[in-house]
Amino acid sequence: MPDVHVPHLDEGHESPGSASGRTKSLLKIGLEVVLITAGVFLGLLGEQWRENAQHRELAQQALRRFRAEFGANRTEVERVHGRHVQQYQALEKYFAEHQAELMANLLDVRKPLPLPIPDMTTDSAGMTYSAWDVALATQSLAHIDPDLVAAMSSAYRMQQMYEDAHRNIQETQYSATLPVALMRGHMAYFGDASLYEELLLKQYVAILARLDKATGG
């Protein structure tokens, strides 16, 4: 009777425990790890791109606000600068031409002051800071050129010094009792204000040029 060959059920298949089977399993696991890692990396990359896009948009919005604010502040400074220079020069001339009469008034306030008395209206530029406040609140300064941020911060600080000078002369107006002393205080104020305004206008020109470049304006 001839021999009958009965094939095993696993004939033609590697045993999972065989070297070949283990290699294929490891390759499969490695491929899955690579695919998972790639998916995570692409997800993180996409999230990073979205965050960078948001940061760029925040920075652009802040830059546009800064452009508008510094433009408005420059207009305000230009509005008063020429008059402050003239007021300082007028008071300087007044003191130079009337030294004797002014000294007499200091010694005796009943002695009249020489007329006409120069204009001492202390009109000051009305400057705003809202763009800086919003940039701090939204943390958008971190996404703007640090050198530009430093330049803007310096201008804002100069504005504060300018406003402090105006506040001081206003307080002097309420407390001064000697007219000549008050006029000297005003002359000092107009001199300081004119200098601050001149420096601010130079800063505004440089900052606005950089803001125009940054915003494509």
Image: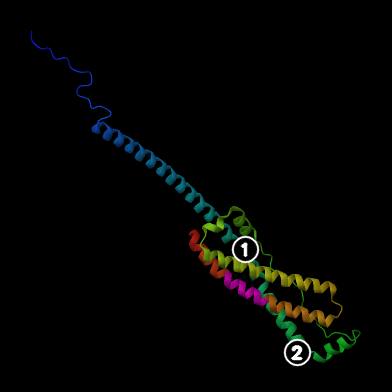
- Residue nearer the viewer, 213 or 143: 143
Q: Identify which amino acid the numbered label 2 is placed on.
A: Ala
Q: Circle 2 sits on which residue?
A: 96
Q: Is residue 65 magenta?
A: no
Kind of residue sitting beneath label 1? Ala
**N-term-proximal mark, 2 vs 1:** 1
The answer to whether residue 180 is above or below residue 8 is below
Q: Residue at x 82, y 92 (%)?
A: 100
- When asked about the image quadrant of residue 16, the answer is top left
| Cα–Cα gap, marks 2 and 1 | 37 Å
Q: Residue at x 58, y 71 (%)?
A: 203
Tag 1 secondary structure: helix
**Residue 151 at x, y percent in the picture:** 56, 68
Q: Identify the residue at the far right of this view.
A: 110
Residue at image mark 1: 72
The residue sitting at the bottom extreme is 100
Image quadrant in which the N terminus is located: top left
Q: Seen from this angle, which residue lies furthest left?
A: 1
| Residue at image point 56% right, 66% down | 150
Please indicate, yes or no, whether residue 153 appears anywhere in the rendered image: yes
Q: Which residues are magenta?
A: 194-203
* Label 2 environment density (alpha carbons within 10 Å; few <14, some 14–19, many ≥20): few
Residue 39, horizontal then vertical, whole percent = 39, 40
Q: Taking 186 as reference, is 27 left or right?
A: left
Marks 2 & 1, CB-CB < 8 Å contact: no
| Residue ranking furthest to the top | 1
